[in-house]
Structure formats: structure tokens, C-alpha cells
Image (cartoon, grey):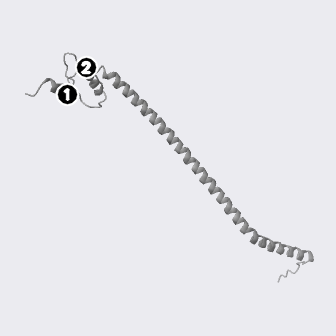
Amino acid sequence: MYNNNNINITPKLIKGAIWGVAGIVLLIVAMAFIRPWYNVWSQEMEGKAEFAKAEQNRKIKIEEAKANLEAEKLNAQAEIERAKGAAEAIRIENGSITPTYIQYLWVRQQGDLNNKTVIYVPTETNLPILESTRALQNPQE
């Protein structure tokens, strides 16, 4: 049999083992006191992070609302300009609307019809005959 009894246990080895065990016990005791403080600090940091995130989200919403307001103001200005243009066109046309001009507008409108068949009936002036004026020209018999 092999017998290994050559282990030299010296006072220095025992002293080192005692210091190692004492260090481990001291570390465990220190962790027992430090951990609650760390948990409080960690939760405080998480709270600050959540607050910063909420503040940033609020600022984003405010900026989006400002952008929407600016867009609505510009849309309103565009609508006002369109109305001014329409009013000016009506003012100009009011003094110069004639049956010929109405026929011209009707012909111009026909250009907007996509893929529809329109039959033009030639007349003496090469303008189409409008249905609304036909009833006025031919009274009911």
C-alpha cells in the first residue's frame, strides 16, 4: 500500500488557513450589510432612468404637437389663399360671363374626364350644344 504521510503542517500553513477562513467569513458578513445598500442604490438609479425616459417621451410629444400645429397653420393659410384665388376668379368672371365663355368652361371640363366617350356636335361656331340651353331654345309644345 501506498501511504502518503509526508504532509508538512507548519504553523505558517495553519496561520494562512485561518486568515483565509477569516477573510471568507468577513466577506460574507460584509456582503450581508452591503447588499441592502446596493439594492437601494440600484432601485434609485432605475427610478432616475425611468424618470429621464418619461421626460424624453414628454418632450417628444410636445415637439410632435408643435409640428402638427405648424402644419395646420400652413394648411389654413393655403386654404385662405385658395379661397382668395377663387373669389378673385369669380369677381373677374362676374362681369364677363357669357354663354360662349360658359361653353368654353364646359369644353375645358371635358378634358378632365378620363376614359369616357364624349360626342361633340359641330355647330356654326364649332362649339358644342349644351343640354341646358336646348330646353330654353325649344319651349314645350
Q: Secondary structure at mark 1?
A: helix
**Furthest residue in direction bottom, as rendered:** 1
- 52 to the left or right of 16: left
Q: Residue at x 52, y 41 (%)?
A: 67
Residue highlighted by disc 1? 132
What residue do we see at 78% from left, 73% from top?
A: 29
User: Looking at the image, which is closer to me, 118 or 71?
Assistant: 71
Residue for badge 2: 100
Q: x and y percent of residue 109 in the render? A: 29, 27
**Callout 2 environment at 10 Å: few (<14), some (14 to 19), or many (20+)?**
few
In front here: 113 or 136? 136
Viewport quadrant of the C terminus: top left
Q: Quadrant where the N terminus lies?
A: bottom right
Crowdedness near tag 1: few (<14), some (14–19) or many (≥20) residues, C-alpha within 10 Å: few
Whichever of callouts 2 and 1 sits on the residue coming sooner in the sequence is 2
Callout 2: SS? helix
Q: Residue at x 66, y 57 (%)?
A: 48
Q: CA distance from mark 2 to mark 1?
A: 13 Å
Residue 25 picture location, percent across and down: 80, 74
The amino acid at mark 1 is Ser
Residue 102: which numbered mark, if any? none
Could you say which quadrant of the image residue 9 lies in?
A: bottom right
Residue situated in front as seen by the camera: 48 or 25: 48
- Asked if residue 54 lies left or right of residue 29, the reply is left
Question: Are dots 2 and 1 in contact, CB under 8 Å?
Answer: no
From the viewer's perspective, is 95 left or right of 16?
A: left
As shown in the figure, which amino acid type bears the numbered disc 2? Thr
Residue furthest right as drawn? 11
